[in-house]
Image (spheres, rainbow, N blue to C red):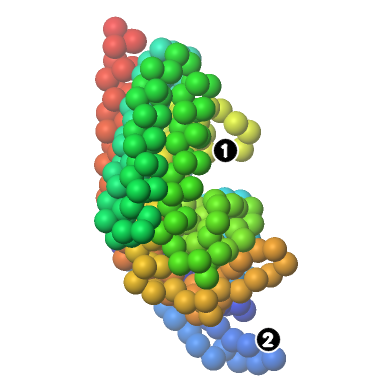
Amino acid sequence: METLYIDQKNAYISTNGKQLVIRQNQPSELTFSHVLTLPLSQMQSLVITADCQLSTTSLHKLGQAGVSVLCINPRNPSASVVCYNGKHGNAYRRMAQYQLYTDTARSLQLARILVKHKLHKHAVLIKNLAAHYPTQRFLLLKVAAEIQVLKHQAMQAGNMAQLLGYEGAAGKRFFEGFKETFDQHWGFNERNRRPPKDPANAILSLSYAMVHYEAVLAISGSGLDSQLGILHRIAYNRDSLACDLVELFRMRINEWVWQQFKTDTFRPCHFKIEHTACLLSREGSQIFYAQFHNQMRIWRKAIRYYVHIYARYLDKHYQEVAA
């Protein structure tokens, strides 16, 4: 099963039987210059990052074939839209989610585990990066040690607000060290978004968003409610459980982004500034999605594994409650 990325304007997306058909032309042309067909059975998702045309009939057929559609907003990846066939018959799992959400003691216990995992991995990443930057070694090791201290404090948090406070402080400290591993010409001075103002933040935001929507699909496919989280509590129009899952992958994403810049996968010409937003150019988008697609094959398995473990936990929890 594959993910297809469409990053060119003026594409016409349709279906013909069991085939996805993509036609490409220029605005001044009367005929199509390029036609691509792909069996729906070989597709898992369709990612659209440019202005295209997709009929409701085709969208319906994609949903019937189990192909999700993700429309990325380049300026604000977190505001993108995902369409998927989220039908699942196991309502008991969602009932268990609601019961767990109201069990503040157990929710806090699970949230602590999530934060502990995240902060430990980030401390390890910063410590490992210190070996690559002798001149910044002292600073990076200090940051790693401070994150470990915040991790231990988080494990003693008496409520969710305190836990989020320690987690937020550790995240801020992480990026204060992480930015020191990027060459100054990238202008990566802080973590910013909506919109991202430099290339590193542009890639970070887009990568987080892609993993987030992959998490939404895995969660919904397991019969869970993606809006009912643990660490991230209920918020209007937010997939809080998917946000929780992304926290488990931030270290992997951050390390992957660092590697892309360290190995010169991206160059300044791969980005453009529109108003205050730093966006990928067409060439940069092609490079990003090619690299990210290969990496997501690995992460997708891990995402589904985490969701499976959580679903099994809820199944057991519901049986305990029902008994």
Structural crowding at the residue carrying mark 2, measured as other residues with C-alpha within 10 Å and reported as few (<14), some (14–19) or many (≥20): few
Q: Nearer the viewer, residue 252 or 119?
A: 119
Q: Residue furthest top?
A: 323
- Quickly name the residue at label 2: 27
Give the residue type that dot 1 points to: Arg
User: Which comes sooner in the sequence, label 1 or label 2?
Assistant: 2
Q: Is residue 113 visible?
A: yes
Which residue position is annotated with label 1? 238
Q: Position of residue 170 (x, y in %)?
A: 45, 36
- The amino acid type found where label 2 is placed reads Pro
Q: Secondary structure at mark 2?
A: loop
Does the image show residue 43? no
The x and y percentages for residue 321 are: 34, 10
Quadrant where the N terminus sits is bottom left
Image quadrant occupied by the C terminus: top left
With 9 as the anchor, is 293 left or right in this view? Answer: left
Quarter of the image where one finds residue 149:
top left
